[in-house]
Amino acid sequence: MISVALLLITVLLLSPAAAITELEENRSVAIEGSVAISALLVQEDGGLIAAGASEAGPALWFIGPDGAITGNVPVDAGNATTLRYIDRAPDGTLLLFTDAFELVKVDEAGTVLWSWHVPYGEVSGLDTADGSAYIASNYLHPMIYRAGSDGTEEWNRTYADASGVGYARLTTVRTLPGGGFAVAGYVQPLAEGMDPTGLLLFGNEDGSTTGEVRYGHENIGYLTSLRLHPDGGFLATALGTDGMTPSLLRLSPDGEVQEITEFGKRLEIAYWASAAPGGGAYVLGYDAEVVTGEPQYLLLGLDEEGNQAWMQWFGDTRVTAVTDYGDGGVAIATDKGDVAVYLPKASEGSHEVTDLWLIVFGILAGIIAFILIKRQM
């Protein structure tokens, strides 16, 4: 009878997994002298530009397609100590955002062409398109700014909670393909005992709002990030009304919830998501270490049904920047000054066997063997 239990273990350990698309590290580089890397920009030739700070202040690093560093460019951006955002303008120049709340336009030599300071609030989201920028900021009430491609403010709008029972906060803004913007966040009621509700606002290029969606009925209390989905609509990371239950939302173009994927105990918070090949998704977040409670960073791969297909573990190495690399790849930067590119691969895997799983299977086998022996007696 013990042999039956052992056979069961063998089946569990060796049963084949379905074919999945995983990511594997394709190349990486350690940027010496970096103090922080906060943003990455993919180049047309497959290279990257990393934005952040060296000991001397704000800086850009140019990384070739082979992973070699081809340039180190300091940026003199006033009172700024680091760069937090990077994008390329239609004329080939670079748009940067600093920790001093300055939107800065520079050439590839780091020469500042113009800068614009956000007047009020703490910036929580920024997105650029056609050389212009939408900026989400939280002050007494949330604000949206639009800065033009010449570095001048075109307009700003304040968005108070229309229901009058709470205050709104914004976390992400995205430029829409047809013009205008979508901004995600939440509304926190003032009355004690009332749950927060996730919030999605839509607006025109002139700043006027065109629609609003709330997600309290879905038990979604906070939208923590928002991203356009290549097939239309959005991917959003969220927290439940308890502020503790992370999930991934697939939203229609008008903000309607189409799918909700929960992560159980795998994640404590998810803060970035992107569409993956074959209808799946990549989700970046962290869990808490069992003993110390310190964040443990990880990248999850989900299949088209929302099931976990694989996991890339970073441990206590904090992921400070992440971006789509193209063709299903992902580029990441860490607080150790490393930049790495991960590309997808198809694999026929088997169940990953760890010491913990061996212990679990051993215990199960012992229980099964004990039951079978008792029945035989």
Image (cartoon, rainbow, N blue to C red):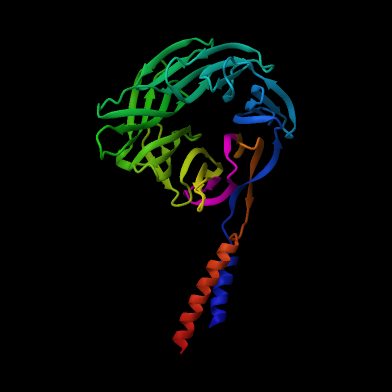
Is 8 or 57 nearer to us in this picture?
A: 57
Q: Is residue 323 magenta?
A: yes
Q: Residue furthest bottom?
A: 377
Residue drawn at x 61%, y 30% as measured from the top left: 36
Total residue callouts = 0
Depth check: 86 or 34 in front?
34
The residue under the point 40% across, 41% down is 239
Vertical relation: 131 (above or below) 167: above
Magenta residue span: 296-324
Q: Nearer the viewer, residue 167 or 134?
A: 167
Judged from this view, the residue extending furthest toward the front is 292
326 falls in the magenta region: no
Task: Using residue 308 as the reference point, say whether residue 23 is left or right of it.
Answer: right
Where, by quadrant of the figure, is residue 192 drawn? Answer: top left
The kind of secondary structure the magenta stretch mainly shows is strand
146 with respect to 327 (left or right)? left
Res. 31 visible in picture? yes
Q: Is residue 147 above or below residue 302?
A: above
Q: Quadrant of residue 233?
A: top left
Taking the image as drawn, is residue 254 in sight? Answer: no
Rendered view: 235 above or below 183: below
Residue 345 lies, with reference to residue 214, above or below; the image says: below
Q: Position of residue 186 (x, y in %)?
A: 36, 32
Q: Position of residue 267 (x, y in %)?
A: 48, 47
258 or 7, which lies in front? 7
The residue depicted at 63 percent of the width and 53 percent of the height is: 347
Location of residue 2 in the rendering, given as x and y in whole percent from the top left corner: 55, 81
